[in-house]
Amino acid sequence: MELIGKIKAKEAKIGVIGLGYVGLPLVIEFCKAGFSVTGFDVDPSKVEKLQRGESYIKHIDSVSLSACRLDGNFIPTTGFNQLSAMDCIVICVPTPLNKYREPDLSFVFDTTKTISSNLRKGQLIVLESTTYPGTTG
């Protein structure tokens, strides 16, 4: 219930892991709604561009991204140790198809290991990455 109250008041700290084609638009929408968002990515060059308010994805304009940065609502980082401060963590990592046309879940598994070492009671973890039913079962 504490998290629900924070969401209603827009005080929840949201972490988005994977700042690609799914994660970055999600970050922008959360920022537009007034939430504080920390974006996590393993690629330092992506994070550096995002810190400057520059988009590296063609269909995402830098104006929206810069607005999020200027408002102070979006902090891109490679510092996964900050995950423990998040109220909600959304996983948006790639799940490319393998040679059998099944999702390669290695990025999801690696991410969950990272989260588990920074986990605290009361956090909401959401898997947004494309996968098949039963993955989290």
Image (spheres, rainbow, N blue to C red):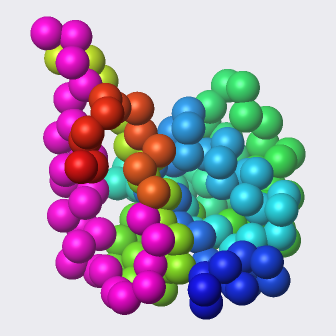
- In the rendered view, would you say 67 is above or below 123? above
Nearer to the camera, 75 or 137: 137
Nearer to the camera, 50 or 11: 11
The total of numbered circles placed on residues is: 0
- Asked if residue 67 lies left or right of residue 22, the reply is right
Quarter of the figure with residue 60 = top right
> Percent from the top left, x then y, of residue 91?
42, 53
Quarter of the figure with residue 75 = bottom right
- Asked if residue 83 lies left or right of residue 117, the reply is right
Nearer to the camera, 122 or 69: 122
Residue, x 29% and y 69% (percent of image)? 115
Can I make out residue 73 in this image?
A: no
> Percent from the top left, x then y, of residue 70?
83, 68
Residue, x 65% and y 48% (percent of image)? 26
- Asked if residue 103 lies left or right of residue 85, the reply is left
Can I make out residue 18 in this image?
A: yes
| Residue 134 part of the magenta segment | no
Residue, x 50% and y 79% (percent of image)? 86
> Percent from the top left, x then y, of residue 1?
60, 86
> Percent from the top left, x then y, of residue 99?
14, 10
Residue, x 79% and y 36% (percent of image)? 61
Residue at the limit of the structure toward the left, as seen here: 100
| Residue 120 part of the magenta segment | yes
- In the rendered view, would you say 35 is above or below 135? below
Q: What is the span of residues highlighted in magenta in the rendered image?
A: 99-125
- Asked if residue 50 lies left or right of residue 122, the reply is right
